[in-house]
Amino acid sequence: MIKSTALASLVATGALALMGMGCNQAAKGSDRSASAQSGSAGANVTTGSGELLVWVMPNSPKPEKDMETLLEPFQAAHPGIKVKVSVLDWGSAWTKLTTAAISGDGPDVVQLGTTWCPFLTDLGALLPLDDLDSAVHMQDAFLPNTWAAAKPRTSSHVTSAPWFIDVRPMFYRTDVFAQAGVDPKSAATWDGYMAALEKIKKAGIKHNGEAVSPIGFPGKNDWNVVHNFAPWIWSAGGDFLSPLGDKCVLNSPESMRGILFYLNMVHKGLNPKTNMEKNTAQVSADFDAGRVASFFESTIKNVYLERPPEQGGSAGSHVSGNYGVLIPPAGPVKRSLFMGGSHLAVFKSSKRPDLAKMLVRYLTADSAAQLAYAEISGFLPALKSAFASPYFSADAKRTVFRDIVAYGRCYPAVPYWGEIETAILMKRLGNLFDIAAEVNGPYSEALVKTEMDAAVKDIDGQIQAHFKNHPEQMDLLKKSMAAAQ
Amino acid sequence: MHLIEETDSSVAGPGPAAPPAVQRRSRFQRMVRSVRRNKVPYIFLLPTVIGMLLLQAAPILQGLYLGFLRSRKDRLLDYLSAPWAGFENYAQILFNPDSPIRSGLWDAVRNTALYTVAVTIGTLAVGTAAALMVNREFRFRAAARTLMLFPWIVPTYVVGLLWGFLWQREAGLVNIVLVDWLHLFAEKPTWLIGPNTLWAIIIPTIWRQWPFSMLMLLAGLQGISKDVYEAAEIDGANAWQAFRRITWPLLKPVWAILILHGLIFNVYSFNIVIMMFGNGAGFPGKHGDLLMTALFRNSFQMWDFGTGAAMSSLLMLAMMTLVFIWYRIFRDQLTGK
């Protein structure tokens, strides 16, 4: 039994090493056929076969079919492996994932939101992927900021690989900016952007008889509350947590400056108060209907605007012919933008971990697969080499997307971030929108500060509770910080 | 059967004077004999009893036990083997004002109390009116009854999503009807943020639940003999008197059940509010947060299952008290005294 296990390990290790070579070649700018060949090289030496269950979220218009298309080269190269894809709804995914982690009855490969990786790593649900890292030098191959979640700060192992990233460029109406006499380049800084918004408001532009608001963003009834605040806080020099990650600094003068700048857009009427009861999808629909001059949305919006109506897009509409994209404005201290996305990980309970790792490697470290999924979904690749494709350089809008990546920043990859974000920040930052909308009385900066003080108290309490149970993680946190410096 | 009873009394001795031990043995023996004699019915009942124990008693006991464990994020995989915490979780809830579980809890308690009372009364009022209406003879009555059930068959999470759109200030149908068509307000009210939030939750819940009340009350109404109304009519009673003296008292047992159902169902309301505000992601605000959403956020989203279970146990205790009060109020109607 021991002998057979050792033999299987040897074969698998050999297969992985060869697969690594194949993927390295692919990552050096090969096309899809080359990647399939690298896959078949792996297939020749891999005796493994069987079924792999993969859980993904709806990342593209036809999630299941799109995944099948993406997996075609891998399936052709590995006829013995049957990949079964299940699509989870984002709303229920977290519950299903944690249930699977606790029960030990989960999929082989799983898509994880970047903020989920540290928690599931801490829970011990994910298989270490250090061998994958050392084989293909993933850390160097991927965009630097994506690596934070792949190897969480309180972990000594790589537990996931970046799959795709989500950045939020500024979408704006070229015709409205022109009508208002605003040069889009002037919106490169906070002050310039604020002046542009005020100019648009003053111009009182209408579209089909309806007023066009200078900017649109949703209030508290939305998934993106924290993501929407993040770039304004960071670009003002503020942050959610201290550099070590052991304290909340949301009420610092720098963080407050960013928060107040963002809320001022509501207070000044640049973002209508009616938007405070909407969600991202509704504000996005307002942009499509011509009621919004500028807004920040994921790059997948571009795919929708370019896609013909028969494929679920809005190509040919007035807005689709009159929009541009910009890198969001730089703040008083720097330009630092939210970068989310998803990673792929292997569950410890996987019965075919070696095959699962092969699949993860194909989807994450294969340049052609990365580019193919970017084209299908509209999200951006996490692999640096994929950006060398003409897909990005030949199109002005996608060139902007490529350039935004350099300013992308992720949340701190600490295991307690999940509850801080979902249970505390969603509520506390959400309350700020109510203050800005003046539903409980006149707007005041003092009310905003009080709410942020309460957030700091809640978050610090949560962090203290975490380290009370895990005192050993403080050392790991300090080490990771020292390594980062 | 008669013979057995006689034999039993002979064993038990002469009534009240018999020693208690003998009485207990006698009762036990009677029970065993009864089971032996009615084996087949008891065998048929057994799967139900086992099912009830597994599906109801086991989760309740597990929940109660979890409330005494330190079942937090770091011990998640331990589940029921998590360290014993004694009354620590209860102390956190009751005596620690800084405990995360208490964040915004009083707002949620106040909102839940108002919501439960308003929804229960509203559901009964609309259900009663509708039941009286469709109890009368008219053309297409069957179709009307069927159509009236429509809101009840809509899943609660869909109700939350649907009304989330209807309440939109500018484009929502509610404001279009109230302001643009009926001119009831000078300005369009905001429903999904601010103090109106509670109404934005109460009204859809009444909309979802009234058909159930109507159905129950209609069944009750149809159980009242027409002869009673005819006799009242002969005695000169008008419609209001007939309702007050006949319909009202005879429907009291149905109302009692509906009030109980409303109280329990509405205190534990979750789906509509969680879906209306951010499809499960948002925060309903201090005017719209209910007990269940607060509990979900402050314990389960914080991975503090022990405190969450302790809080649920306290809530169960409060609900048992409420049910006890309900029973004392409606005991006569329910027992037919």
Image: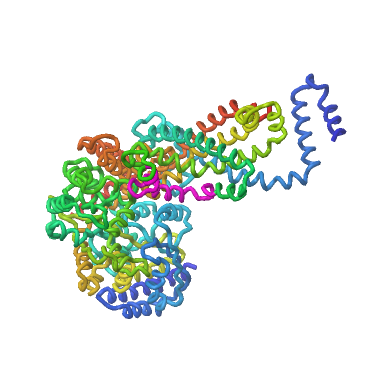
The foreground one among A78 and B102 is: B102
Task: Decide if residue A357 is on the left or right side of residue B235.
Answer: left
The foreground one among B17 and A432 is: A432
Q: Position of residue A197 (x, y in %)?
A: 17, 52
Tell me the quarter of the image containing the C terminus of chain B.
Answer: top right
User: Where are the magenta residues, as a range?
Assistant: B150-178
Residue name at image x 64 percent, y 30 percent: B242
Residue name at image x 25 percent, y 55 percent: A292
- Splitting the image into 4 quarters, where does residue A356 fall? bottom left
Q: Is residue A181 visible?
A: yes
Query: Does the magenta portion include B160?
Result: yes
Query: Does the magenta portion include A234?
Result: no
Task: State whether residue A12 is above or below residue B2.
Answer: below
Q: Farthest residue toward the top?
A: B17
Tell me the quarter of the image containing the N terminus of chain B.
Answer: top right
Q: Position of residue B333 (x, y in %)?
A: 64, 29
Q: Position of residue B215 (x, y in %)?
A: 60, 42
Q: Position of residue B255 (x, y in %)?
A: 59, 34
- Splitting the image into 4 quarters, where does residue B252 fall? top right
Q: Is residue A151 visible?
A: no
The foreground one among A432 and A218 is: A218
Task: State whether residue A474 is above or below residue A133.
Answer: above
Task: State whether residue B249 is above or below residue A68.
Answer: above
Task: State whether residue B251 is above or below residue A64.
Answer: above
The majority secondary structure of the magenta stretch comes to: helix
